[in-house]
Amino acid sequence: MSRTLADAADWWPEDREHRARLLKRLAERGAEAQRAEDVARREAWGATVDRLAWAAGLDAYPVGYLDELRRDWPG
């Protein structure tokens, strides 16, 4: 942690003597990075789902396939 605070003091020299401010800045940056990572992960997952949703192609199942399948379902 001391190394991290020393780095933070280099990044924000105006707060070099204020450890609480440095910690606050580090926490804010960490939260921003985590939010960005979450967005990127959701976008990547969405792209994967979109890509796989069409992997079989439009003609993978014949017309009426679901209706035929559902006829076997209990009532």
Image: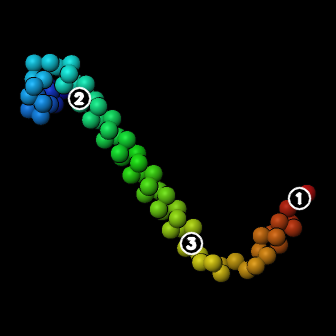
Q: Quadrant of the C terminus?
A: bottom right
Discs 2/3, front: 2
Residue found at the far right of this picture: 75
Q: Residue 35, position in %: x, y?
A: 37, 41
Circle nearer the N terminus (2, 1): 2
In this orientation, which residue lies closer to the viewer: 52 or 16? Answer: 16
Q: Residue 53, position in %: x, y?
A: 57, 67
Identity of the residue drawn at 52% across and 65% down: 50
Secondary structure category for the residue under label 3:
loop
Q: Quadrant of the N terminus?
A: top left
Q: Residue 13, position in %: x, y?
A: 8, 28
Circle nearer the N terminus (1, 3): 3
What residue sits right under mark 1 in the picture?
74
In this orientation, which residue lies closer to the viewer: 71 or 29? Answer: 29
What residue sits right under mark 3 in the picture?
54
Dot 1 crowding, Cα within 10 Å, few <14, some 14–19, many 20+: few
Dot 2 crowding, Cα within 10 Å, few <14, some 14–19, many 20+: some
